[in-house]
């Protein structure tokens, strides 16, 4: 079967998935989605609009706030330093960023709503940060973190400041998995070791080798012109454009956990690097290490919302056992969409989702700009998109289950 025949079949099928995602009742305002194999993109599509108010059409070069899909790129920057022997995953973080030693453990709140705190007994290591076992949370996924921030005046992470990640440990470091601001701290480690801003390190060590130019923590004038507007979905399902929702330009801190903007074709270059065992950036053994469960007997799971304007409660593929690597979620079992066990994925707060299937040499990215997270319109579209990719490729004999 020729490569072009596969691309034609994907286009016919996936264009319909995108059109359905924006056309149905309660659908997404607009979406860009792409699929890549080890050689290049085999599908690129766009549907809907960048902004419901302006009706500007969504195009494949539209620029998105990547939110937590930033994390894997920051993890890659850290793993480059591990390869070079400049850091060890077992190192205590305070060796590079002393401020982390000042973060206390939260033991609850007193009757006046003030936090009860104690010193951590265990040093936070880089490994814990990479695996989300250090104890940190997110203000929109933790009632306790949110309450602590309010009591202590800790700013929102969306302010892109160092103070915004100096929250509290929700448990003793290493005890369990909990999704939080860990990778922002990883970014500070990268900066401390390299003596440069995180964005500079990414540009030199990752973006340049991969030919990624339409990406950064600060939007260029061209990127700003092509930026998709974030929309907010109210409880009654109505979508409202929020053009004022933009991360600080230029940020005080390059937020390794969520701060990048990019067009989606740039991210598929990163996905392709992982599919090709790190070609141009990392050693094959490093990518293999990054792709394995690092949690041991611990598991990653779902999340609860402490801010319904930013996130819904949810979990990816409920009933499928999941773990964590550096820094992706790993599905320990096959997903209902057709992805085999042991592959990689993650997401971003404004309903962006990607997966990397190293077994079959296939990856995909689904991008929208909607709050709250796991939006019914966008997330359903992503599941249909991934399922359609696998069913189409299976029909053409391109997939090993």
Image (cartoon, rainbow, N blue to C red):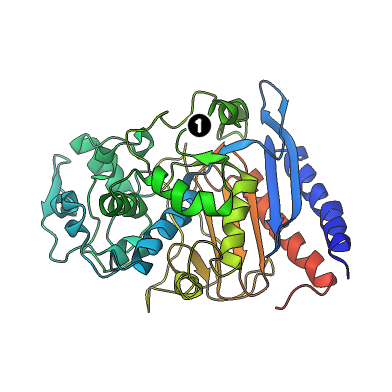
Q: Which residue is mark 1?
A: 219
Report which quarter residue 334 is drawn in.
bottom right
Q: Residues within 10 Å of mark 1 (few under 14, many from 20)?
A: many
Q: Position of residue 213 (x, y in %)?
A: 56, 42
Relative to 158, is 318 above or below? below
Q: Position of residue 294 (x, y in %)?
A: 39, 73
The quadrant in which the C terminus is found is bottom right
Query: Is residue 157 left or right of 273 when viewed as pictured?
Result: left
Residue at x-position 45% and y-position 69%:
290
Mark yes or no: residue 355 visible: no
Q: Nearer the viewer, residue 338 or 194?
A: 194
Give the structural element (helix, strand or loop) at label 1: loop
Q: Position of residue 239 (x, y in %)?
A: 62, 30
The quadrant in which the N terminus is found is bottom right
Q: In the current view of this chain or complex, which residue is farthest to the top?
A: 54
Residue at x-position 32% and y-position 45%:
196
Query: Is residue 155 left or right of 247 when viewed as pictured?
Result: left
Q: Position of residue 386 (x, y in %)?
A: 69, 59
Count of numbered circles in the view: 1
Mark yes or no: residue 312 visible: yes
């Amino acid at each position: 079967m020729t490569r072009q025949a596969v691309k034609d079949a994907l286009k016919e099928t996936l264009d319909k998935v995108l059109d359905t995602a924006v056309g149905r009742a309660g659908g997404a305002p607009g979406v860009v989605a792409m699929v890549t194999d080890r050689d290049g993109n085999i599908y690129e599509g766009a549907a809907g609009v960048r902004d419901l108010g302006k009706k500007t059409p969504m195009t494949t070069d539209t620029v998105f706030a990547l939110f937590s899909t930033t994390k894997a790129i920051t993890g890659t920057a850290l793993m480059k330093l591990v390869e070079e022997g400049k850091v060890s995953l077992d190192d205590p973080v305070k060796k590079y960023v002393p401020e982390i030693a000042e973060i206390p453990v939260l033991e609850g709140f007193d009757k006046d709503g003030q936090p009860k705190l104690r010193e951590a007994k265990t040093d936070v290591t880089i490994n814990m940060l990479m695996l989300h076992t250090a104890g940190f949370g997110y203000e929109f996924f933790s009632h306790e973190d949110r309450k602590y921030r309010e009591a202590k005046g800790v700013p929102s992470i969306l302010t892109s400041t160092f103070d915004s990640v100096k929250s509290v440990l929700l448990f003793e470091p290493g005890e369990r998995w909990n999704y939080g601001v860990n990778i922002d701290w990883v970014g500070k480690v990268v900066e401390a070791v390299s003596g440069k801003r995180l964005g500079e390190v990414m540009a030199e060590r990752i973006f340049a080798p991969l030919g990624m130019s339409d990406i950064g923590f600060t939007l260029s004038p061209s990127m700003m012109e092509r930026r998709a507007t974030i929309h907010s979905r109210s409880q009654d399902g109505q979508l409202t454009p929020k053009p004022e929702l933009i991360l600080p330009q230029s940020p005080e801190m390059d937020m390794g956990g969520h701060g990048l903007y990019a067009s989606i074709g740039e991210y598929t270059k990163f996905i392709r690097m992982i599919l090709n065992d790190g070609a141009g950036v990392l050693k094959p053994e490093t990518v293999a290490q990054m792709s394995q469960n690092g949690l041991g007997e611990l598991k990653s799971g779902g999340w609860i919302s402490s801010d319904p304007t930013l996130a819904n409660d949810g979990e990816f593929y409920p009933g499928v056992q999941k773990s964590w690597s550096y820094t992706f979620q790993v599905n320990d079992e096959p997903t209902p969409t057709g992805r085999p066990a042991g592959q990689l994925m993650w997401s971003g707060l404004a309903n962006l989702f990607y997966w990397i299937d190293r077994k079959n040499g296939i990856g995909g990215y689904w991008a929208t700009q909607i709050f709250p997270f796991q939006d019914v319109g966008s997330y359903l579209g992503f599941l249909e998109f991934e399922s359609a990719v696998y069913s189409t490729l299976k029909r053409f004999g391109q997939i090993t289950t």
